[in-house]
Image (cartoon, grey):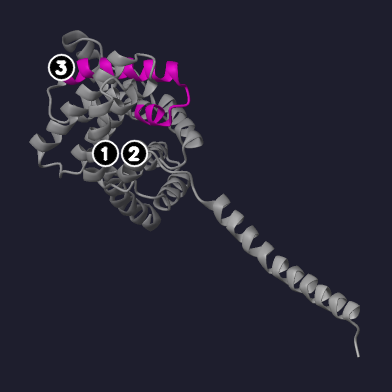
Amino acid sequence: MPTSKNCCSIHYRWVYVFLLFSLTALFPAIAAKKAKKATIKPTETPIEIADEALWQMNYSKADSIYSAELHNNPCNADLHWKMARLQVSLGESFPKGNFDARMLHYRKAAEYARTSISLDSTNAKGHTWLAASLGMMAEKIGTKEKLKRGQEIKRELDTALRLNPNDATALSILGSYYREAANIGWFKRMVGNAFLGEVPKGNYTLAEKAFRKSISIDPGIIRSYHELALICIKSGNKEEAISLMKTALDKPILIESDKRRIEEMHALLKQLTKE
């Protein structure tokens, strides 16, 4: 028969075992809670939520948040260029035949971009999106006005890239500028200089360099692949053009104009693979 002392010893031993198992069971729960806590993302700011909505092409949500933030922070240069970017995207969401609606948003984009520059002229994005909005506004204007606007676009792109040489969007737009300038033959250039003023200068080599750098900095910009592929087709480099477009087709669509480019690349690939 166990003594009182032995009973106490057995009792404490069972208490110890119970506590040991309790703590052993508890530690994984604590560890799990810590792991769960560690994986919780930090709370997104309203501007980050608006940016995400923009890339999801939920323009009404992005507009609502940006506008509310701008109401509270009217002197925030970043908010103004982000609104310019949004307005360009909204303009592109309308069919090309709906010229008036497109132009309304492009004009608003230019206003927001100019305000951003007036608030902070050292913010590269303000200059980038002013150049973008001016380029989009050049859809249906006369040759003389288009050439004048081309000078301002180039000036804004040069400023943007001086402030931030790694601005992938500015580089992509610059590539388009050089590609368009290269399409002006020597005769048109001569006529332009004689009767219309200075004609934009550029060539396919400069355009290709700008597009390649844009892709190296931000591999997600579909327009850079598309436009570089067009240059490759022009120079007879069909294999690289096909490779560039196939790569672009795997990228997520982030803006409305990406949809049009995707369609054009599908048609080009079909044509090139038949040849």
Q: Residue at x 37, y 58 (%)?
A: 274
Mark 3 crowd level (few <14, some 14–19, many ≥20, 10 Å Cα):
some
The location of residue 36, given as percent across then percent down, is 56, 56
Q: Amino acid at mark 2?
A: Pro
Alpha carbons under labels 3 and 1: distance apart: 39 Å
The location of residue 76, given as percent across then percent down, is 31, 22
* Residue 212 appears left or right of 199: right
Q: Are marks 1 and 2 in contact (CB under 8 Å)?
A: yes
Q: Nearer the viewer, mark 3 or mark 1?
A: 1
The secondary structure that most of the magenta stretch takes on is helix
* Residue wearing tag 3: 144
* Residue 212 appears left or right of 202: right
Q: Is 72 in the magenta? A: no
SS label for mark 3? helix
Compared with 93, 69 (above or below) is: above
Quadrant, the N terminus: bottom right
The location of residue 207, given as percent across then percent down, is 40, 28
Q: Amino acid at mark 3?
A: Lys
- Indicate which disc, 1 or 2, sits on the residue closer to the N terminus: 2
- Foreground pick, 143 / 66: 66
Image quadrant where residue 119 sits:
top left
* Residue wearing tag 2: 46
Image quadrant where residue 257 sits:
top left
Alpha carbons under labels 2 and 3: distance apart: 43 Å
